[in-house]
Amino acid sequence: MKSICIIGLGQFGSNLAQYLSRNGVQVVAVDLRQDHVNAISDKVTQAFVGDVRDRDVLETVIPKNVDAAVVSIGETIEPSILCVLHLSQMGIRKIIVKAVNDDHAEILRAIGAHEIVFPERDMAERTGRNLLQKNMADILSLSADYSIKDVEPLPEFIGKNLIELDLRKKYHIYVIALKNRDNLDEITILPYIDTVIEPHHIMTVVGKDEHINALVERSIT
């Protein structure tokens, strides 16, 4: 069973601790405030009051074999920096830290943090993506026969541009995005008609299910 230590039981840390615990993770929670610890003590495996700026405290409450430590300490940067420094020196295998700003994040990475999170920023971006996706879904819901799917380009597509391929006429589909299979964060939305299909491309297309499925079948035969 996975074991995770949550350090700092504000809104983010407390909600994360409870979510992980509900999903079968052994959670050790630590906070400087007794009321925060009392509020969560019956919802996690163990909960401790302690000053995590003190390495002795961390070594006392954090199991040696913990899978990860999540540091979510307030709005001041000094406690989280000291805590991450100690965790890194202790050899904690994965350290995830909530950062206040980009400068804070750089310092945390320099002293051993493996992953940085910005909860408010991340949630805003996730919500924005969901809204954009929902808008597209609303458009497509005008007909149950239409879909958006990622498909592999056929071998004969490689090296040709979209105007040469004329996929609208030949396959009755529209290419609305191109993704880089080697880096899925690299996406070209509504590519220009002179865009050349490369071997690393994945095509995001929209069209009737029967037309998309016909193209998919050709790509795997």
Image (spheres, rainbow, N blue to C red):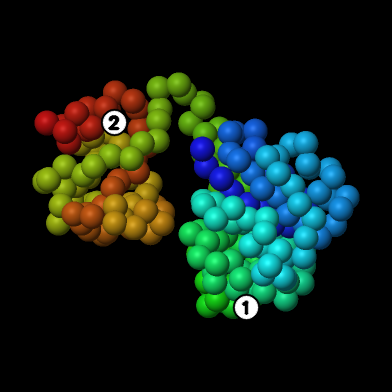
Residue 209 coordinates in the image, percent (x, y):
33, 25
Residue 101 visible here? no
Residue 196 visible here? yes
Q: Is residue 187 above or below residue 165?
A: below
The residue pinned by badge 2 equals 212
The residue pinned by badge 1 equals 103
Q: Residues within 10 Å of mark 1 (few under 14, many from 20)?
A: few
Q: Earlier in the sequence, mark 1 or mark 2?
A: 1
**Which residue is at a point 36% across and 36% down the rendered structure image?**
149
From the viewer's side, name the closer residue of 174 and 50: 50
Label count reads 2
**Which residue is at a point 27% across and 27% down the rendered structure image?**
213
Residue 112 coordinates in the image, percent (x, y):
52, 71
Q: Residues within 10 Å of mark 2 (few under 14, many from 20)?
A: many
From the viewer's side, name the closer residue of 208 and 59: 59
Residue at disc 1, secondary structure: helix
**Is 13 on the left or on the right of 133, as rendered?**
right
**Which residue is at a point 15% across and 52% down the rendered structure image?**
158
Q: Is residue 61 above or below residue 205?
A: below
Residue at disc 2, secondary structure: helix
Residue 81, by quadrant, is bottom right
**Is 11 on the left or on the right of 101, as rendered?**
right
Residue 163 coordinates in the image, percent (x, y):
23, 52
Q: Amino acid at mark 1?
A: Asp
Q: Is residue 187 above or below residue 111?
A: above
Residue 2 coordinates in the image, percent (x, y):
52, 42
Tell me, yes or no, whether the two marked residues, 1 and 2, touch with CB atoms within 8 Å.
no
Q: Residue furthest right?
A: 35
From the viewer's side, name the closer residue of 207 and 66: 66
Q: Nearer the viewer, mark 1 or mark 2?
A: 1
**Which residue is at a point 51% across and 27% down the rendered structure image?**
141
Q: Amino acid at mark 2?
A: Ile
